[in-house]
Amino acid sequence: MANMLLQARLALLDIEGTVSPLAFVRDEMFPFAARRYGSFFAKQFDSPGLARALALLQADAAMEPKPWPVDDAGKAAAYCAYLTEQDRKATGLKAVQGLIWDEGFASGELRPPLFSDVKPALKRWQAAGCHLAIYSSGSEHAQRQFFAHTSEGDLGALFAGYFDTTVGVKREAASYLAIASKLALAPELVCFFSDIVAELESARQAGMQTVLVNRPGNAAQPAWDGLVITDFSGVNISG
């Protein structure tokens, strides 16, 4: 692609379809968790380490048209399976998945691949004075583990922040304003990269710079009148 120079203090990045192939998350990470809901809750339901994720899951369940009780291990596992089947990006589900993925990251069974242009670009942008952060529907915990165990090594130290849907859903402008506020940056100093036009529109409404990342294998998107790239190889950011 042609060279592109952006002026931003922070590059805010989505994960799936932006820095890592969508297929890895869809075909490996999600099934890995789904196969383990029953055994995970059977072992961990009363564990203090599950308390926060379980509280988030209970809050999600209470918002269902017909409240779904998750007051025991079997009901919690069934609710997670239901949310997964519905492809719901519920905050509680994401927190539970993140805890289950820990086992896969630790064993090496889950080793997240990055597009080949990602690591060089992140290092190039950081060297030019641009900070880096992640905003994904996956839990903050899962994001940290994801980048600590990539196929390119532990990249966790590159990022100044990780944000999940506890800050707000990705298709609302208020979420991006909240992230900018937490980082003490004016929104116009942040550039958000995503493969989803609806997310980019929300970020743009908040005043952020936006770039659509159109990787091979990504879902087709509506027409987008902003910047579009197919990889990061020609993108430079000056902070």
Image (cartoon, rainbow, N blue to C red):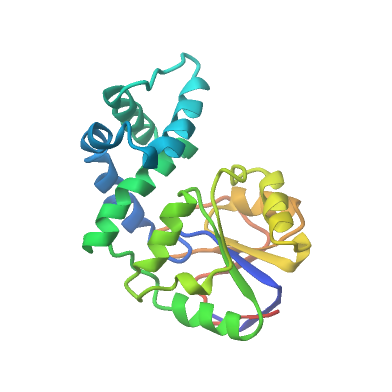
Q: In the displayed orientation, state which residue is furthest to the top.
A: 66
Q: Is residue 183 left or right of residue 105?
A: right
Determine if residue 190 is in view. Answer: yes
Q: Is residue 148 above or below residue 4?
A: above
Tell me which corner region of the image, top left, top right, bottom left or bottom right, holds residue 81. top left
x and y percentages locating residue 12 in the rendered image: 60, 64
* Side (left or right) of 136 relative to 187: left
Q: Nearer the viewer, residue 45 or 27?
A: 45
Residue 28 x, y percent position in the rendering: 27, 53
Q: Which residue is at 33% across, 27% downward?
A: 76
- Say how many tags the image has: 0
Looking at the image, residue 108 lies above or below residue 178: below
At 48% across and 63% down in the image, what residue appears? 18
Residue plotted at (33% across, 50% down): 26
Name above or below for residue 177 compared with residue 4. Answer: above
Q: Residue at x 35, y 47 (%)?
A: 99
- Let me know if residue 88 appears in the view: no
Q: Is residue 17 left or right of residue 134?
A: left
